[in-house]
Amino acid sequence: MNIITEKLSLGKTLEVQRVLKNMTVQQVIAQAGIATSTYDNIESGRTKSPNLLTLKKIARVLDLDFIYLTNLIGENTQKTE
């Protein structure tokens, strides 16, 4: 059994959860009510600090904890400083 010991980035966390839920990007954006480019930029890591309302919508659709995701934002910005 492979155990992931490294914490994933925000974008990778969203991608993994989306795949685990067998959802396409199109399904996520339709249910969250956000633009394709917005989601693509977050999942790819181009957007490091997304709008919190947007993140909350994505968290709801992917059944992820919003507070956990916001903590990943802080970690991502600290790594790049």
Image (tube, grey):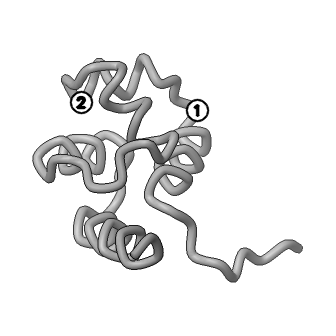
Residue wearing tag 1: 22
How many circles with numbers are drawn on the protein? 2
Q: Quadrant of residue 32?
A: top left
Three-letter residue code for mark 2: Ala
Vertical arrangement, residue 27 with respect to residue 50, above or below: above
Three-letter residue code for mark 1: Asn
Q: Residue at x 24, y 62 (%)?
A: 66
Identify the mark at residue 32; answer none if there is no mark: 2
Q: Nearer the viewer, residue 73 or 19?
A: 73
x and y percentages locating residue 10 in the rendered image: 44, 58
SS assignment at label 2: helix
At label 2, counting other C-alpha atoms closer than 10 Å, the crowd grade (few under 14, some 14-19, many 20 or more) is some
> Answer yes or no: do the residues labelled 1 and 2 have beta carbons within 8 Å?
no
Vertical arrangement, residue 56 with respect to residue 66, above or below: above
Quarter of the picture containing the C terminus is bottom left
Vertical arrangement, residue 19 with respect to residue 74, above or below: above
Q: Nearer the viewer, residue 75 or 17?
A: 75
The answer to whether residue 31 is left or right of residue 64 is left
At label 1, counting other C-alpha atoms closer than 10 Å, the crowd grade (few under 14, some 14-19, many 20 or more) is few
Q: Earlier in the sequence, mark 1 or mark 2?
A: 1
